């Protein structure tokens, strides 16, 4: 007799193989206690967290914690429903106004997570007569949003404006009804979209552009608004989505637009309408984090110092990395899945937690040890991360002919 | 217009490198269960097929594609519209 669970047996087998190699399940690591923005207890020992996307280290910022505590006491633990049914709290609306002002945009909508932001916008903004042209390396939330919607979905080759142009050309009259989707910094390899070139192409065809700045908010641009600010093309970007769960240290997502008409879309987005809204404490810590991000460039500068040091240190050791310096640093491993998992375990044993990324989740195949740096990492911690990688480099060399 | 048979012959050449073990490819060959394509390899095959036929293949066709024959039919429609 078959079971509903039969189709998950290959997953169970793969998990069992990984546990046999590493002694722990790399995709179910339990953080026993969070010590700080960069340290935690795992398997009974203190570990440096170098794979958390906590770019500015704001999860333990005293001002953010104080703001969250005040909201928690004054407005309770949760909103117990959606904004359309239960009403928006004043803080939800205030955050939307602050985001619109921060991005110099006409409209802003806050969502319960970054995933939901993309799900909502990608599924609703475009209809059956429209086309979504997305970069092949776009995040799963973008792909999933397109599956929930009714637009025709076509991919263009990663970071390849010429391929984008070819596909817009093929669309003929429909090119003007096309939404092009790219990311500020791609989450796996840390590379950026060639935004100026992509804008040149989409402008020639009258297409619209959405940039997901999930990994670039607080990381790129003089004011931390992301890649569009850094490249100086903000007025030519139609929609920006992003998350509060990385640089802003909380949970939530957003979409901003230079088009005030975005406000009308709010009332049609099922992932917005039928989800509980963010709790008051999350909204309050997010507002405080956005204020900190706005008033100080020091955290961003420290983040880039740390990223540059780690990237250059790993290059000097001979590791193959993503194509450019970024707070997302992906180490490509010329190793089997089992060997990659063992190397990941070796890093953990040495007190360093990074993300293990295995095929088919990796761009171009192969396995990755993905680090994400934080402004809160100290010099001692960066050195410790480099020392740990140095030891696994020795192991890798021993295994190679 | 290319016939379904013509398209299938070209598809066999495109799909063959993806087969994990030698199998006879035919109209009824399943892309997931027989060729062994996972979600990422399906995307790679789509990219190669786009290059080969010089068309864009919408991802929306995927739910209707189980076999090579299904894929050939979808390609035939796309080639007709291009």
Image (tube, rainbow, N blue to C red):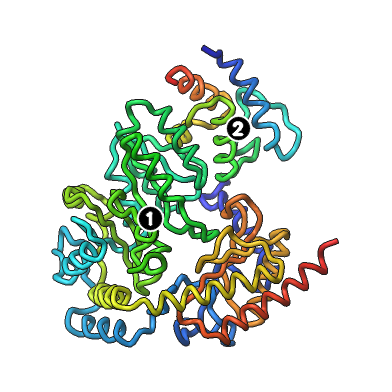
Q: Position of residue A201 (x, y in %)?
A: 40, 39
Position above or below: B33 against B5:
below
Please tell me whether mark 2 sits on a helix, a strand or a loop: loop
Near-viewer residue (A78 or A367): A367
Left or right: residue A102 versus residue A401 is left
Image quadrant where residue A397 sits: bottom right
Q: In which quarter of the image is the C terminus of chain B?
A: top left
On what subunit does the disc labeled 2 rest?
A: B
Q: How far apart are the two marked residues, 1 and 2, measured between alpha carbons? A: 35 Å
- Would you say the residues marked 1 and 2 are in contact, meaning their CB atoms lie under 8 Å apart? no
Query: Relative to residue B5, is residue A132 drawn left or right?
Result: left
Residue A354 is situated, as x and y percent measured from the top left of the image, at 57, 72
Residue situated furthest right in the rendering: A401
Q: Is mark 1 on a helix, strand or loop?
A: strand
Task: Report in which chain the residue with disc 1 lies.
Answer: A
* Residue A302 in the figure: left or right of residue B45: left
- Is residue A303 depicted above or below B75 in this figure? below
Same subunit, tags 1 and 2: no
State which mark lies toward you, 1 or 2.
Answer: 1
Residue A168, placed above or below residue A142: above
Residue A329 appears at what percent x and percent y? Answer: 56, 66
Residue denoted by label 1: A212
**Considering depth in this image, is A62 or B68 the residue closer to the camera?**
A62
Residue A51 visible from this viewpoint: yes
Q: Position of residue A264 (x, y in %)?
A: 16, 48
Residue located at (67% from left, 66% from top): A341
Q: Mark 2 — residue?
A: B30
| Residue A7: mark | none
- For image coordinates 65% across by 61% down, the residue present is A332
Picture residue at 46% right of the left edge, 70% below the top: A53
């Amino acid at each position: 007799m078959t079971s509903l669970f039969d189709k998950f047996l290959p997953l169970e087998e793969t998990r069992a193989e990984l546990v046999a190699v590493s002694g722990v399940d790399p995709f179910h690591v339990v953080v026993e206690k969070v010590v700080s923005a960069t340290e935690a207890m795992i398997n009974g020992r203190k570990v440096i967290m170098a794979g958390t996307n906590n770019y500015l280290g704001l999860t333990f910022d005293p001002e953010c914690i104080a703001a969250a505590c005040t909201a928690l006491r004054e407005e309770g633990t949760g909103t117990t429903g959606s904004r359309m049914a239960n009403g928006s709290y004043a803080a939800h609306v205030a955050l939307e106004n602050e985001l619109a002002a921060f991005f110099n945009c006409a409209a802003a909508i806050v969502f319960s997570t970054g995933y939901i932001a993309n799900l909502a916008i990608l599924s609703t903004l475009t209809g059956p007569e429209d086309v979504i042209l997305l970069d092949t390396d776009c995040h799963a939330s973008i792909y999933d949003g397109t599956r929930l919607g009714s637009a025709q979905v076509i991919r263009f080759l990663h970071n390849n404006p010429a391929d984008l142009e070819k596909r817009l050309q093929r669309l003929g009259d429909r090119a003007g009804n096309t939404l092009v989707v790219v990311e500020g910094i791609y989450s796996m390899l840390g590379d950026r979209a060639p935004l100026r070139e992509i804008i040149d192409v989409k402008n020639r065809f009258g297409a619209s552009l959405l940039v997901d700045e999930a990994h670039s908010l607080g990381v790129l641009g003089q004011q931390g608004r992301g890649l569009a600010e850094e490249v100086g093309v903000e007025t030519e970007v139609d929609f920006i989505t992003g998350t509060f769960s990385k640089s802003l240290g909380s949970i939530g997502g957003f979409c901003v637009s230079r088009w005030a008409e975005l406000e009308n879309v709010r009332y049609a987005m099922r992932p917005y309408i039928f989800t509980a809204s963010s709790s008051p404490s999350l909204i309050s810590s997010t507002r405080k984090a956005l204020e900190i991000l706005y008033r100080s460039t020091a955290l961003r500068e420290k983040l880039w110092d740390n990223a540059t040091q780690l990237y250059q240190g790993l290059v000097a050791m001979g590791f193959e990395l993503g194509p450019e310096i970024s707070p997302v640093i992906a180490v490509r491993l010329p190793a089997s899945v089992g060997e990659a998992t063992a190397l990941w375990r070796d890093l953990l044993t040495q007190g360093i937690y990074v993300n293990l990324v295995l095929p088919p989740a990796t761009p171009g195949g192969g396995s990755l040890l993905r680090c994400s740096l934080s402004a809160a990492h100290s010099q001692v911690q960066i050195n410790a991360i480099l020392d740990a990688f140095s030891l696994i480099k020795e192991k890798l060399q021993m295994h190679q002919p | 217009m290319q016939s379904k048979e013509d398209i299938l012959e070209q598809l066999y050449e495109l799909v063959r490198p993806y087969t994990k073990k030698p199998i006879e490819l035919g109209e009824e060959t399943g892309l997931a269960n027989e060729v062994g394509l996972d979600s990422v390899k399906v995307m790679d095959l789509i990219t190669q097929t786009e290059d080969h036929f010089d068309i864009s293949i919408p991802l929306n066709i995927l739910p209707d594609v189980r076999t090579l024959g299904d894929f050939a039919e979808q390609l035939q429609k796309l080639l007709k519209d291009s």
